[in-house]
Image: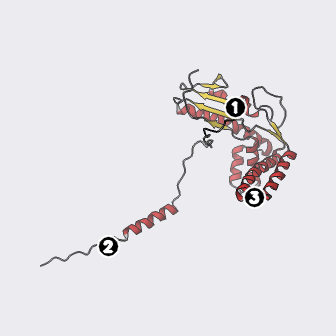
Amino acid sequence: MSRRKLPEVDAGSMADIAFLLLIFFLVTTTMDSDEGILRQLPPPVPEDQDIPDVKQRNVYVVLVNAQDRLLVEDEPMDIENLKDGAKEFLIANGVFRDLGDKENFPIRTWVRRSDVQEKIDEYETYIANAEDDTQRDNYRKALEKWQDKMTAIEIAGEYKELPGSALISMQNDKGTTYDTYIQVQNELESAVNELRDELSMRLFGITYNQLEEKAKSTESGSEWEKRLYAVRTVHPQRISEAEPRNVGSY
């Protein structure tokens, strides 16, 4: 008696089904992005490009060696004093009032309503007469910066701003421990956040974190969002990280 042969399963369409399932999961699945320290690193400088001179008074240099010791502005510093030192650098020579010129700190310049309005009018003219979309987009980006300054003036009043080259420069040794690296990061960010807190409390009676939450919970372009941008414009985050290297001992 012959045994009946079982019919073979046609697997020809299995690859198509698997491909469709893969597409389905790619389209419907959301990936949570890892959160870390938010930094926008500068683009690499071409070798043939001249690097402009930066006034030393505009840079607050923070070095961390392999023994987790700090050298700030060529002077040893304990980490618990770093935040206050960074704040002094960031608000030197007045934000809303003249405090006199402090040597070795950035020279702030006034942001006046009339000057800002003149720039806004100027870039609106450039946009209207732009030769192509690329040029028009570039002018729009510049215009938005001046509009942010005008918003800051309307909300906070005329103020003094840091020069464009002013920043806190942090550089750690390759042997710096991760714990110290994070502590230094936190202290520097706290300096900026405390200044934003003080301004937010003075203007709106709430902390900067509360201001952020209110801005996030409202629609784009809301009054709370404008207030948030105003505080950020007056007190921008100017923290730059250099590539780790052997910074020596001190």
Would you place residue 13 above or below residue 123 in this image? below
The C terminus, quarter of image: top right
Would you place residue 146 above or below residue 51 in this image? below
The picture places residue 169, in percent across and down from the top left corner, at 65, 33
Residue 189 visible in this rendered orientation of the protein: no
| Dot 1: element | strand
Label ID, residue 59: 1
Residues tagged 1 and 3 counted as in contact (Cβ below 8 A): no
Label 2 – label 1 distance at C-alpha: 71 Å
Residue 106 visible in this rendered orientation of the protein: yes
Name the front one of labels 2 and 3.
3
- Quadrant housing residue 135: bottom right
Name the front one of labels 2 and 1.
1
The picture places residue 10, in percent across and down from the top left corner, at 32, 73
Of residues 227 and 15, the one nearer the viewer is 15
At label 2, which amino acid type do we have?
Asp
Disc on the earlier residue, 1 or 3: 1
The picture places residue 65, in percent across and down from the top left corner, at 56, 26
At label 1, which amino acid type do we have?
Val
In the rendered image, the residue lying farthest to the left is 1
* Residue picked out by circle 2: 10
Label ID, residue 131: 3
Tell me: 74 left or right of 180. right
Q: Residue at x 23, y 74 (%)?
A: 6
Badge 2, how many Cα within 10 Å: few under 14, some, many 20+? few
| Dot 2: element | loop
Residues tagged 2 and 1 counted as in contact (Cβ below 8 A): no
Q: Residue at x 57, y 43 (%)?
A: 36
| Dot 3: element | loop
